[in-house]
Image (tube, helix red, strand yellow):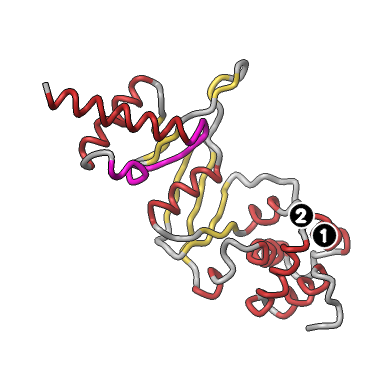
């Protein structure tokens, strides 16, 4: 009797945590650590999955799914998936390639493969028709993780030196806040020479570099 009560208690507590984060939250069993032992948490998640409360996206990765009145269940948010993986692996993630360019408004194309640089292990996660790729990179690249400068550097690397035009520079100037531009000044030392000049131009510091 006590065992059944304990299982229900863990399931109930798990629901409270999941509901507390709201629909769209992606998580791993590690996010529920402290509610019980690992096996009990996995059993609770299995029951919640069978009930339709959560859905399993891949091995050890779950979502409290969003639902649209007409469209039904919506696909998981890539950013939420990446945050869950980052928490699990205790590492930072830096959007790279076409994804970085899209996030900054330098490209309208949403890449089928979302590439993130990481301090952790390289891996791939396929969710529906979308693939999220985590690529282990150098400490120098990760030095700008979680900063606007890091996103700009990765986006410009993807676009290429001879493809960056005045329109793109104008987009960056409009999109980045005063604090973002200050980030560009602080992190400019991590950029290749040609990107450094663009970053300083966007930051409004044309005479440096």
Write the residue at 73% across / 67% down: 160
23 falls in the magenta region: yes
Q: Dot 2: few (<14), some (14–19), or many (≥20) neighbours within 10 Å?
A: many
Q: Dot 1: few (<14), some (14–19), or many (≥20) neighbours within 10 Å?
A: some
Name the residue that disc number 1 marks: 168
176 falls in the magenta region: no
Picture quarter containing residue 172?
Answer: bottom right
Report, in whole angstroms, how far the alpha carbon at label 1 lies from the one at label 2: 6 Å
Q: Nearer the viewer, residue 159 or 189?
A: 189
Residue furthest toward the top?
A: 70
In which quadrant is the N terminus drawn? top left
Q: Nearer the viewer, residue 207 or 36?
A: 36
Q: Which of the marked residues, 1 or 2, is nearer the chain's N terminus?
A: 2
Write the residue at 29% across / 28% down: 11
Write the residue at 66% across / 80% down: 189
In which quadrant is the C terminus drawn? bottom right
On the image, the x and y values in percent for residue 116 come to 54, 57
CB atoms at circles 1 and 2 under 8 Å apart? yes
Q: Secondary structure at mark 1?
A: helix
Picture quarter containing residue 6?
Answer: top left
- Magenta segment boundaries in residue numbering: 21-34
On the image, the x and y values in percent for residue 19 come to 45, 30
Write the residue at 63% across / 58% down: 97
- In this picture, residue 27 sits left or right of residue 94: left
Label annotation for residue 106: 2
On the image, the x and y values in percent for residue 85 come to 43, 50
On the image, the x and y values in percent for residue 129 come to 53, 37
Picture quarter containing residue 157?
Answer: bottom right
Label annotation for residue 129: none
Q: Nearer the viewer, residue 133 or 182?
A: 182
């Amino acid at each position: 009797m006590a065992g059944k009560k304990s299982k229900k208690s863990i399931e109930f507590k798990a629901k409270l945590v999941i509901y507390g984060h709201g629909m769209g939250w992606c998580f791993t069993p590690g996010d529920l650590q402290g509610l019980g032992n690992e096996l009990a948490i996995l059993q609770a998640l299995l029951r919640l999955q069978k009930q339709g409360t959560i859905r399993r996206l891949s091995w050890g990765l779950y979502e409290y799914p969003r639902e649209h009145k007409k469209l039904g269940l919506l696909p998981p948010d890539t950013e939420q998936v990446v945050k869950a993986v980052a928490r699990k692996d205790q590492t930072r993630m830096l959007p790279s390639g076409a994804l970085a360019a899209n996030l900054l408004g330098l490209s309208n194309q949403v890449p089928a493969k979302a590439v993130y640089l990481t301090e952790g292990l390289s891996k791939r996660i396929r969710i529906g028709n979308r693939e999220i790729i985590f690529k282990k990179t150098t400490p120098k690249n990760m030095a700008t993780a979680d900063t606007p400068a890091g996103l700009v550097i990765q986006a410009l690397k993807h676009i290429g030196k001879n493809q960056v035009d005045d329109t793109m520079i104008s987009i960056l100037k409009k999109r980045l806040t005063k604090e973002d531009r200050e980030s560009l000044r602080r992190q400019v030392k991590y950029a290749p020479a040609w990107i450094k000049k663009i970053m300083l131009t966007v930051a409004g510091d044309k005479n440096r570099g």
